[in-house]
Image (spheres, coloured by chain):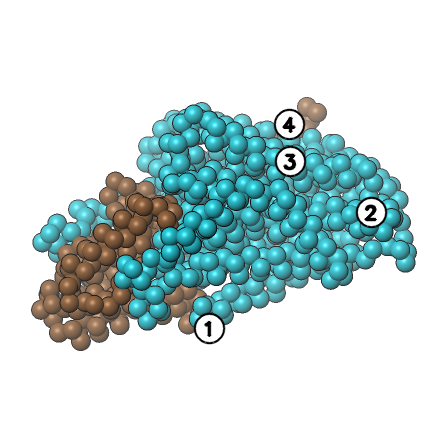
């Protein structure tokens, strides 16, 4: 019995070193060498400062930017330090109210847009950090953004098309638009 | 569902089944001490571990010694993990300066990771230092998975053994599972995940300064964004492969740093079922009748596909209020189906596929928030857990759980024709049936009695965050998860209270060890028996008839036990929702 206990303690110690320290540190080392950008959070750099991550959404609500999905993180939306979803049930009155408010806000920002509201624009993502919207959600907002910026609609649509990623390898996942990249591209266009 | 979406489902099931044979054969070779040439360079490390720990690899154990060693490992693992959490404020590798974790939460988390449940009452990025995540949680991800695989191998030896007292050596099985199977697969998966964008760094966070122009006229945008980072990829790889499921970040595999692309999603989802599925073939090889393994795999796959179908149907229907609110109802206008709590890059299909896989296996990681699923969509993961985590199930534990159901099935079939039941040449007698019954029923008791106690506790209202009947589903889901060592949650449920931490912790302990120990007892009892050659009266256990019988027993035990509880939760909610429409 005592012998087995000694073995147990030694086993936990050895595997703590091998699987708990050597393994993650070795992976960290290789990752930093082979994929430094991804391992550090896929940051988007502008003039030496990180303005965002390709993988993490940011909060936009000015008319001249494309808006991302609602985010349920606290205390502020898109809090990259505390991820999470709303966890509201479909029939929860709080959820139905949130849907109505979001639809009303989109309609108020662009009263001329009569199309059905894309569902992803009014539902909170699971992480609260979703960087993407559906191509339909980008198309829905294109006219508003073009008007607010005084850009031709076709040009904005072109930027949307350029920021649209198809399913990976044409097969996996859904087509999507990276909102931060699209907005950065819009700003770049106006600067010129 | 579109053609592309059906293709993804078929591709997933297809690739999974294609991996079963090579990986299953490899694992059988490893456990029989005949590791393939490609990995023999690991043998010196294996011997070194034995020497350092005082393991005599050639000494075989009785089932009681085997169970004793397994329990001791878990006790020591628990003490270390509890200590790491309580002391993390004074220990190194804590760049974010996180303090000690409360005693009840530390107890719950230590139990949770030692029992391969990985229920998480805490949010990773706001609670755990890098040292706790790596040396504490990652280590237990490996060890709890390896222990599950070891116990399955012991049970298999019980079927194979001829009048012997021994079921193998726990330390050898544990070491081989880790060194030859979990470790190599984890290294490969972790690196692929980093390539796809999963973070792997010792920095605790990075501060983002959004470009000046992002501050809209109406105050839009944020002044700065702090992104939590950490050594995530290494932990995520083993969390999926070892059916652990505990996320590095609070949002688990919905977090873009934990699961950034559809490819990372596909591979993680594949990793969830990979080893549990392949172990069926390992079983077939080790009992020298591969048809037996394929039959069990077929039973698992059929039930999996059935539940997947229900989930896909429920979640991809348009929102019940869509027309009234002016939301998209056709694919031209935007996503249809239930997008609350789901990520755009995965969509409904990959979210449901994951939810089904993670609860069929006792994994419990999530890439979407199950709490926001439709009533029927949320019922699917709940039922898959309640069936006892035997549809693929945990690594090792899933298959040994299903083998308990196999014993029950041959017993019932034996009753029907009036013959002593046999399985793989071993007579199934009173002792085996008693142990199998305990193993099947204790998780059910944990779920139902745990739920009943929890809903009667004062203050439960503060933990429930959705109106009834969904609020009841949150409690039932929590205990279905803990009582079957899954670990996923209806995450709105406020589980991090002393009472819930204690109750759920007890459920996890009972569910793990009151199945594991009866399984080892069966292994010991069977190993001591003679082999009975099959006769014309023996029920063949690899036929479609037997597969159907087995599925029937699994579903009937589950339905008889849980339909009343489900009627108060998801079923009532579905009826109510159909009513308002």
Dividing the picture into quadrants, the one containing residue B346 is bottom left
Which subunit holds the residue at mark 2? B
Question: Which residue in the structure is indicated by mark 4?
Answer: A6
Residue A70, position as x, y percentages in the image: 27, 52
**What secondary structure is found at the residue carrying circle 3?**
helix
The answer to whether the residue labelled 3 contacts the one labelled 1, judged by CB atoms less than 8 Å apart, is: no
Question: Which residue in the structure is indicated by mark 2?
Answer: B415
* Chain B colour in the picture: cyan
Question: Which residue in the structure is indicated by mark 3?
Answer: B442
Q: What is the number of the mark on residue B3?
A: 1
User: Callout 1 environment at 10 Å: few (<14), some (14 to 19), or many (20+)?
Assistant: few
Whole-number angstrom distance, CA of label 3 to CA of label 2 = 24 Å
Which subunit holds the residue at mark 4? A
* Chain A colour in the picture: brown
Whole-number angstrom distance, CA of label 2 to CA of label 1 = 47 Å
Give the mark, 3 or 2, whose residue is nearer the N terminus.
2
Badge nearest the viewer, 3 or 2: 2
Q: Where is the N terminus of chain A found, in terms of image quarters?
A: top right
Residue B461, position as x, y percentages in the image: 39, 32
Whether residue B22 is visible, yes or no, is yes
Dividing the picture into quadrants, the one containing residue B116 is top right
Whole-number angstrom distance, CA of label 3 to CA of label 1 = 43 Å
Q: Residue at x 21, y 72 (%)?
A: A157
Q: Are marks 2 and 1 on the same chain?
A: yes
């Amino acid at each position: 019995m005592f012998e087995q206990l000694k073995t147990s303690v030694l086993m936990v110690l050895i595997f703590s070193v091998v699987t708990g320290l050597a393994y993650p540190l070795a992976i960290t080392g290789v990752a930093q060498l082979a994929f430094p950008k991804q391992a550090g959070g896929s940051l988007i750099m502008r003039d030496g400062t990180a303005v965002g991550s390709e993988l993490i959404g940011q909060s936009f609500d000015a008319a001249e930017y494309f808006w991302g999905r609602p985010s349920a993180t606290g205390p502020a939306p898109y809090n990259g330090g505390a991820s999470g979803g709303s966890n509201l049930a479909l029939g929860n009155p709080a959820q139905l109210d949130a849907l109505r408010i979001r639809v009303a806000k989109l309609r108020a920002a662009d009263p001329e847009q009569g199309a059905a509201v894309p569902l992803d624009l009014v539902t909170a993502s699971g992480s609260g950090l979703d960087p993407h919207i559906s191509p339909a959600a980008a198309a829905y907002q294109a006219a508003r953004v073009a008007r607010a910026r005084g850009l031709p609609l076709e040009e904005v649509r072109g930027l949307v098309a350029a920021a649209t990623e198809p399913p990976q390898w044409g097969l996996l996942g859904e087509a999507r638009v990276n909102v931060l990249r699209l907005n950065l591209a819009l700003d770049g266009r106006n600067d010129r | 569902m579109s053609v592309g979406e059906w293709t993804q489902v078929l591709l997933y099931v297809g690739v999974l089944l294609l991996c079963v044979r090579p990986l299953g054969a490899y694992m059988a070779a490893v456990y029989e001490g005949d590791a393939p040439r490609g990995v023999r360079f690991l043998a010196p490390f294996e011997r070194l571990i034995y020497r350092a720990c005082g393991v005599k690899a050639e000494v075989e154990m009785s089932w009681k010694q085997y169970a004793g060693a397994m329990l001791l490992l878990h006790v020591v693992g628990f003490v270390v993990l509890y200590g790491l959490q309580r002391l993390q404020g004074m220990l190194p590798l804590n760049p974010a300066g996180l303090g000690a974790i409360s005693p009840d939460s530390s107890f719950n988390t230590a139990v949770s990771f030692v029992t391969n449940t990985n229920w998480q009452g805490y949010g990773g990025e706001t609670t755990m230092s890098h040292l706790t995540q790596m040396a504490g949680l990652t280590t237990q991800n490996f060890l709890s998975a390896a222990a599950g695989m070891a116990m399955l191998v012991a049970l298999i030896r019980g079927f194979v053994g001829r009048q012997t007292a021994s079921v193998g050596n726990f330390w050898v099985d544990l070491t081989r599972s880790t060194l030859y199977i979990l470790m190599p697969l984890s290294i490969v998966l972790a690196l692929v995940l980093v390539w796809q964008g999963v973070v792997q760094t010792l920095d605790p966070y990075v501060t983002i300064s959004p470009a000046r122009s992002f501050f809209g006229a109406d105050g839009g945008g944020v002044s700065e964004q702090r992104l939590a980072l950490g050594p995530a990829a290494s932990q995520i790889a083993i969390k999926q492969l070892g059916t652990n499921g505990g996320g590095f970040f609070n949002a688990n595999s919905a977090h873009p740093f934990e699961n950034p692309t559809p490819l990372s999603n596909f591979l993680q989802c594949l990793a969830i079922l990979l080893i549990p599925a392949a172990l069926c073939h390992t079983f077939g090889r080790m009992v020298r009748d591969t048809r037996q393994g394929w039959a069990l795999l077929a039973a698992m796959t059929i039930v999996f596909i059935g539940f997947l179908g229900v989930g896909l149907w429920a979640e991809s229907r348009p929102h019940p209020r869509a027309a009234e609110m002016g939301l998209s109802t056709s694919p031209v206008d935007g996503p249809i189906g239930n997008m609350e709590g789901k990520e755009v890059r995965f969509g409904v299909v990959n979210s449901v596929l994951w939810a089904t896989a993670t609860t069929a296996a006792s994994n419990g990681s999530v890439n979407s928030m199950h709490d926001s699923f439709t009533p029927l969509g949320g019922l699917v993961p709940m039922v898959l857990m309640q069936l006892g985590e035997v549809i693929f199930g945990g690594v090792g534990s899933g298959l040994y759980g299903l083998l308990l159901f196999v014993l029950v099935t041959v017993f019932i079939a034996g009753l029907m024709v009036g013959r002593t039941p046999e399985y793989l040449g071993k007579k199934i007698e009173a002792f085996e049936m008693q142990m199998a019954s305990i193993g099947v029923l204790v998780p059910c008791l944990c779920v139902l009695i745990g739920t009943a106690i929890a809903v009667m506790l004062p203050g439960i209202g503060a933990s429930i965050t959705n109106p009834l009947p969904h609020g009841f589903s949150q409690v039932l889901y929590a205990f279905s998860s803990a009582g079957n060592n899954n670990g996923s949650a209806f995450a709105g449920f406020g589980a991090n209270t002393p009472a819930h931490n204690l109750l759920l912790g007890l459920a996890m302990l009972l569910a793990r060890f009151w199945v594991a120990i009866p399984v080892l007892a069966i292994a010991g009892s069977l190993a001591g028996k003679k082999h009975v050659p099959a006769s014309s009266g023996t029920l063949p256990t690899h036929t479609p008839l037997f597969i159907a019988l087995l599925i029937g027993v699994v579903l009937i035990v589950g339905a008889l036990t849980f339909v009343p509880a489900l009627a108060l939760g998801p079923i009532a909610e579905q009826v109510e929702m159909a009513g308002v429409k």
